[in-house]
Image (cartoon, rainbow, N blue to C red):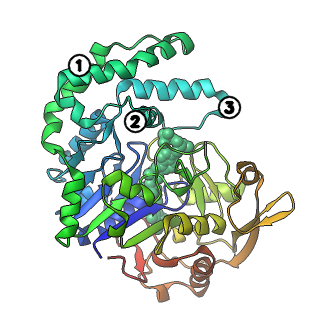
Amino acid sequence: MPAIVVVGAQWGDEGKGKATDQLGSQVDFVVKFNGGNNAGHTVVVGSEKYALHLLPSGILSPGVTPVIGNGVVVDIEVLFQELDALVARGVDVSRLLVSSAAHVIAPFHRTLDKVSERFLGKRRIGTTGRGIGPAYADKINRVGIRVQDLFDENILRQKIEGSLDQKNHLLVKVYNRRAITVDETVEELLAYAERLRPMVADTSLVLNEALDAGKTVLFEGGQATMLDVDHGTYPFVTSSNATAGGVCTGSGIGPTRIDRVVGVIKAYTTRVGEGPFPTELHDDMGEFLRTTGGEFGVTTGRPRRCGWYDAVIARYSARVNGLTDFALTKLDVLTGLEQIPVCVAYDVDGTRFDEMPLDQSDFHHAKPILEYFPGWTEDITGARTFEDLPANAQAYVLALEGMSGSRMSVIGVGPDREQTIVRHELV
Ligand code: GDP
Ligand code: IMO
Ligand code: MG
């Protein structure tokens, strides 16, 4: 089973970090293919808790080669900070590879992210403010700066000049901010070059050779299906392809290489930032999920919006990612509820939708059609086999499996590596 993809099936924070970390001992490479330090993955190993943003979660597994693919946008200052923090805790980070074709988040991208959000007012996206959108915009606009540009001062200067030219007009004339000089940007980025150089590689070549040699490669998605720039709730999305298709463009391997696609999905739903969310709860139940599930952002600390499981989204994710498996997480958070509502379809102004509405305004008006499943009160955090779960918890999982479009192969019953039930092996 050489190439495995792990993606978020909802709006992020499903527990992709834990899922990747868990597979870490069985894989040779873990590759990040999209996004940047907008991601926030919490990995709990015994008494140790790690928060990873830019680095793939596989970095915590001894022997694994972590890779930052060409589809990632790299804030080099953050990269070094994360590496230093891990080294200080005794993690070996020496194998990290960074694609020479990955784009760089420059300081002005962060500035632009923040001012443009402010300018959007009530139409804002609620971004993480990390410069992700502006860096991808430059990439698509063909004025981006790539990792390889850092190793030639003349080229770097030219690229920065090209990139800053229009932006300074915008910053000064529209946003009323100071102009950013080419010199300050060149100086800051050049300062990273020497330390970065040994990590830089043709990661597409490395990964294809590894697959040829029968090695196992895990691709770890940042963000999630509903935040994908093409398949998510546009414009309330991130600026990359977080779905399985992004693996190929973001790492330089072909689709025929991929054997398994795992969608990580919570037993309920959360969302951070703005945008539609049909099953969102504004009552005590939402507060219950937030408090019990610890639903506060790893990156920005923002409280996450919470709601019930949405099977329409699960089916949509199964479809657009070609999922072979789901990893269902945080089942333990639902313990103690008398009954558990699940959204099986939407009502849009009197019309029933069993699949995602094509039209954005329909999705904005979607009201969940709920089915209710009996809850359980037993503590399930110690369950290690499906049979260890109370009958109602088993029935809940099987019901979700029946309506979500793929099998529920792994079930999370707590944040720790060990707190996992494996029904079907993923590697
Ligand atoms: P990611 O961005 O998809 O990696 O997810 P986050 O790390 O942002 O959020 C998931 C949170 O849930 C983290 O704090 C995890 O430690 C935690 N978590 C993951 N799986 C489980 C689970 O099965 N049960 C519980 N209670 N917590 C979990
Ligand atoms: P992980 O990998 C949840 C959301 C932001 C905002 C939108 C655009 O931890 O699941 P951006 O900064 O990317 O331009 O913001 O996307 N967002 C996430 N929400 N989990 C994430 O990552 C996210 N990364 C971005 O809140 O709504
Ligand atoms: Mg997260």
Which tag is nearer the camera, tag 2 or tag 3? 2
Q: Point out the image quarter for the N terminus.
A: bottom left
Q: Are marks 1 and 2 in contact (CB under 8 Å)?
A: no
Kindly identify the amino acid type of the residue bearing the numbered disc 1: Glu
Question: Is the C-beta of the residue carrying label 2 under 8 Å from the nearest atom of ligand 2?
Answer: no
Which tag is nearer the camera, tag 1 or tag 3? 1
Find disc 3 in the rendering and name its residue: 122
Asked whether 1 or 410 is in front, the reply is: 1
Please identify the residue farthest to the right as the structure is shown.
350
Q: Position of residue 267 (x, y in %)?
A: 57, 68
CA gap, disc 1 to disc 3?
36 Å
CA gap, disc 1 to disc 2?
21 Å
Asked whether 231 or 292 is in front, the reply is: 231
Task: Tell me what residue is drawn at x 19 percent, y 53 percent.
Answer: 91
Q: Against 13, is 341 above or below?
A: below
Find disc 2 in the rendering and name its residue: 139
Kindly identify the amino acid type of the residue bearing the numbered disc 3: Lys
Kindly identify the amino acid type of the residue bearing the numbered disc 2: Lys
Q: Position of residue 312 (x, y in %)?
A: 66, 66
Q: Mark 3 Cα within 10 Å, few/some/many (few <14, many 20+)?
A: few
Which tag is nearer the camera, tag 1 or tag 2? 2
Give me the disc on residue 187. Answer: 1
- Counting residues from the N terminus, which is met first, the one under dot 2 or under dot 3? 3
